[in-house]
Amino acid sequence: MIESSNEPVANGVDMKLHSRRFPEEPFLIDLFAEWQRLNYRYAVLRDYQTLPETTDGHDLDLLVVPEDLEPMFQTTRRVAARHRGQLLACYRQSGIIARFAGKEGAWWGVAIDFFSDLSYRGLPFFDAAKVLAHAISWRTIPVATQGDAMIVGFIKELLHNGCDRKNYRVLASREFCQDIPGYSVILEKCFGPKGALVLTRLFQQEPDRGEPLESVARHVRRLHKQQHRRISPGQYFKRRIHHALHRGRRLFFPPGYCLAMLGTDGSGKSAMIESIEQALGSALHGAIKTRHWRPGLLPSIVVLLGGKGPDGPVTNPHQAPGSGKIGSLLRLGYYALDFLLGYWLIVFPQLVRQPCLCIFDRYFYDFYMDPLRSRVNLPPWIVRLFDGFIPKPDLVICLGAEPEVIFARKPELSLKEITLQMDRLRRWQQTFSRSFWVDSGQSMEQTRDEVTTLLFRAMARKMERHYGIFPE
């Protein structure tokens, strides 16, 4: 049963929320109203104090009755569409991890995690039904009690990360000690008597005493598995297989997205990347990684030979003379190896692990447009041979403008060289199906909106291919 919350609201916070409008506010208010109208059974787990106006930079963690999980997710997609938003990234595990964004006057984004249980690697670590039964009401929104939220949050951090990154332990310990018998019963069910004892001692001792959390986490994980294997071997293996299959699916359908931004110096790449980070920061919960040119698994050739790389942006990229044919071939092969190995060992695991955006400021295709930057002097057909082995980004955006406009912005390169690079980029863009040309000679706002719209549309189409178009 949902009860009313007795927690006071500070006048300053309440006035602040109502005195300004947040980009995601119309979507969130509509969303919570729709969930209430359809009588979905759920509870917000934590960070609810600023709802329903804004998530205040947090992701929205929801515990949902299993029968309502899929309908609630599809309803969220429909409400997002009403506010000119779309599902940009998603994967399924014990629930649905989803990222929504759009533009309704301003760019808005919300990260929503729908959980049907509270589990670690497919095995429950807390009684979800009890959390839902204890839920209270916050401004008509069902939310978990502080005790349940803090204890669940701390155990989740302990199991997943072996630490207390979000500083839940102090509050969790205080809440636990107010109802030791009740919480001990829940812990014993999920961790067994020994595991419940270990966690009880952990909650009762001072944070700076006892074993390091990493050691405790290893012990608790082992007891957690043993308990579930003991009480129901069949269910244990079923849950583990189901969990492994979902994780395996992400290898073939990564929830992350890879974008490459191409253009000459002065075309506006840095400004556009910054705009994308601002537009998508809330939706992806900050999971945006920008890389300059290549993955960076291997050091630059200058560093490899004992030199020192540049401390900041390169102001004269053509200062060093080009290499000969053999030297150019070695350079191209070395950097191609970094693109190949670096993508599969660094970039791809990030795309698989979570809904994220990996942005490359330039990419391997720079060898076509500006080979002198890397001191490579080879025929284009040789570059194409290496290009056949390089993983392709999901989307490539080519920024171009009149050479005179770019030269006026950044005259490090000659007008002749800028014209030559623009011509090469335009010809290459017409051969690559995942690329789009954007005129960066227009205003910054127009360019930003065009680039962001292209990215949103491409990310949403990827989700539609994987999860289907939501029912009308």
Image (cartoon, rainbow, N blue to C red):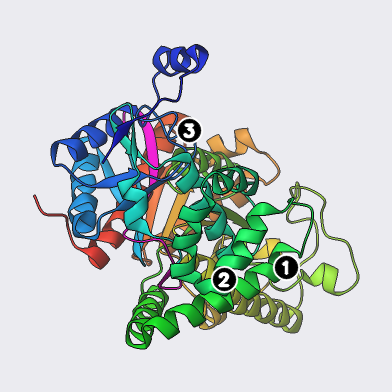
Compared across the picture, whether 104 is left or right of 336 comes to left
Marks 3 & 1, CB-CB < 8 Å contact: no
Residue 109 is at least partly visible in this image:
yes
Compared across the picture, whether 241 is left or right of 165 comes to left
Q: Amino acid at mark 3?
A: Asp
Say if the magenta span includes residue 118.
yes
- Residue under label 2, please give it: 195
Real-space CA distance between mark 2 and mark 3, rounded to the nearest whole angstrom: 36 Å
Characterize the local packing of mark 2: few (<14), some (14-19) or many (20 or more) Cα atoms within 10 angstroms: many
**Residue 240 x/y as whole percent:** 40, 81
- Image quarter where the N terminus lies is top left
- Residue under label 1, please give it: 375
Residue at x 69%, y 72% (from the top left corner): 297
For discs 2 and 3, the disc positioned in front in the rendered view? 2
Compared across the picture, whether 80 is left or right of 223 comes to left
Real-space CA distance between mark 1 and mark 2, rounded to the nearest whole angstrom: 60 Å
- In the image, residue 256 sits, relative to residue 311, either above or below, namely below
- Pick whichever of labels 3 and 1 is earlier in the sequence: 3
Q: Magenta span: helix, strand or loop, mainly? A: strand
**Front position in the image: 394 or 6:** 6
- Pick whichever of labels 2 and 3 is earlier in the sequence: 3
Specify the quadrant of the image occupied by residue 217: bottom right
- Pick whichever of labels 1 and 2 is earlier in the sequence: 2
